[in-house]
Amino acid sequence: MSSPSQPPRSALVAKLTRPVARPLAATYRWVDERMGISDLTHQLLYEAVPRRGAWSYSLGSATLIIIVLQIVTGMFLLWTYVPSTTEAWESLNFIEHHDEFAAIVRGMHLWGAYVLLFVIGLHMIRTFVSGSYKKPRELNWIVGVILFLLVLGLGITGAMLPWDQAAYWTATVVTHVVDYIPFFGNWTQEILRGGPQMGPETLTRFFAIHIWLLPALLVPLIGLHLILLRRHGEHGSWVNYEGVESETEGERATRMAEAEYPYPAVPSDPGYAVPMDLDDFFPSQVFKDATVSFVLVLIIFVMAVVVGAPLERAANPAALNYVPTPEWFFLPLDQLLVQFPQAWMIPVGVFVLPGIGTTLLMLVPFLDRSPEREPWRRPEVMVPALFAILFLIFEALLAVNRLFNL
Amino acid sequence: MADSAQELAKKRISRRRFMIVGINAVGAGTALLIAAPIVGSVLSPLFAKRKTPWVLVADISQVPVGVPTAYVVNLPIDEGWTVPPVPRTVYVVKLNLNGSVEMLTLSNVCTHMQCDVHWDINLKQFLCPCHGGLYSITGVNIGGPPPWPLFRYEHKLVGRTLYIRNVLTGA
């Protein structure tokens, strides 16, 4: 589609590129006529988004880009990795010593996971502070929490696959946690391990869960997350709704009537269906999204080249003195294992407390139902959330102190 | 005539109903056909019969009295398509109780989260480095989070030769 605002191309350039450009353009027109690519692109790119605070809205797209990076690097790790207890470690050891590029791919997969969890955390905090989960976006918050749990699952199953000491003992502890489920614990553990003890099927099962089962759940849910986002329009943060309360009814009616696609969000609290000031998704927001994603991928790349992914010695089930250090995002849970000793208390630390935490996280939109968006006017949710985050950090620090001062 | 038109409409709806119910039934049947073998294969470890042969550990006359001694034993782990000998550590504890000798064959797997415990010479206790579990010389859990005593491998003596097999019992 040519628009009148298109800059005039130099006549020389036009002349030189014509032999290539004309058949290309003709081909594009032919395909477009049949597939509607222009319409689709237009629909995807031309929507209104909130103008203020836009850099912080790039965290969601950064999450998406890093998940794509994880899928792509994961695909190519499969070119060498063998999911077998006798060869998994050998195949990765080969990568680390004889295939520098594959070692970088492996490093990017590991650091991609770390950055992904960190960015998802920021994305959740941003969404929470802005109150973006409020009517009508409650379900998208819940989908987001499920996506977060799936990514945690991908993180922990991925950590088991190298079958080095760290992987083996992580897998041992994680699969033994489920043994404390009342009544069905033993069965669950046996199903996950493929037997009563760690063995060859433990690895093949977790491999299948990591590369197929969890991604097959993750990808469609990401689609749903995006469809719901587009359905409601981006909420943005509270700065986009300053002055909503002092608006006259006439002003509000005009704002609603003049709202650009995909606004106004329905059903919404009065005044919060359209941000006060709008911008174009393309190119304003896409530019910010692309920049943030580039910086993050650059960090992942540099960490992969400089630090890489560690590979400890091959798994030794007869070890006498090996201390498995959990991945950093599981440190708070590991600390709960210490704080809830003895048979009857272990399920409290392992299931009840994390279960309550997850349930509360899911229910946030139903606990905080006022239309108020400004974080300092919602202390009843901001203060508990702050304590929850401080608690997680505190637990992680206790775990670090315990594990590294042995 | 109006009656028959109504009748016809009713019939049309019932034909529609029939197909909708049919779609659901056939769909459920299809899903069941696919799901049943998958669920069965996922659950298969629960139904597996496993062999647990006896494996030689040591000549007990070599085991010191009162000091838990670690032996690495290649226990066949009968799982899936393979029976790989997996190295496991067994602590043989020889105790002299009022003149009679008692043999314990303790697994070094912590009962809390299944990390690897070791005999700490200074503490004179088994120590788990993961979450700080402590066990006495007989494997009784005496500190930290472990909920149960260390499990024991089933053992037998043939003459002075000690054998264990991969069957664990509580203390």
Image (cartoon, helix red, strand yellow):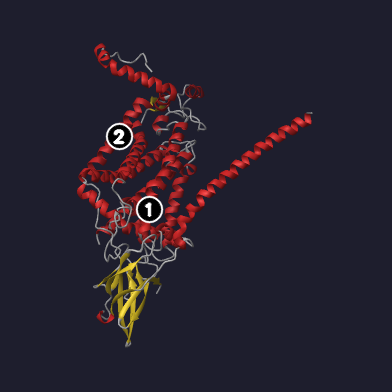
Say whether residue A239 is left or right of residue A96.
right
How many residues crowd around disc 2 within 10 Å: few (fewer than 14), some, or many (20 or more)? Answer: some
Residue at image coords 75%, 34%: B7
Which residue position is annotated with label 1? A206
Which kind of residue does numbered mark 1 sit on?
Phe
User: Residue A388 location, x and y as percent?
Assistant: 38, 49
Question: B62 or A392, which is in the foreground?
Answer: B62
Say whether residue A15 is left or right of residue A152.
left
User: Residue A260 location, x and y as percent?
Assistant: 45, 24
Determine the image quadrant of residue B110.
bottom left
Q: How many angstroms separate mark 1 from mark 2 (CA)?
A: 33 Å
Whether residue B138 is visible, yes or no, is no
Q: For the view shown, which residue lies furthest in the top direction?
A: A11
Q: Could you tell me which quadrant the N terminus of chain A lies in? A: top left
Which kind of residue does numbered mark 2 sit on?
Val
Badge 1 sits on which subunit?
Answer: A
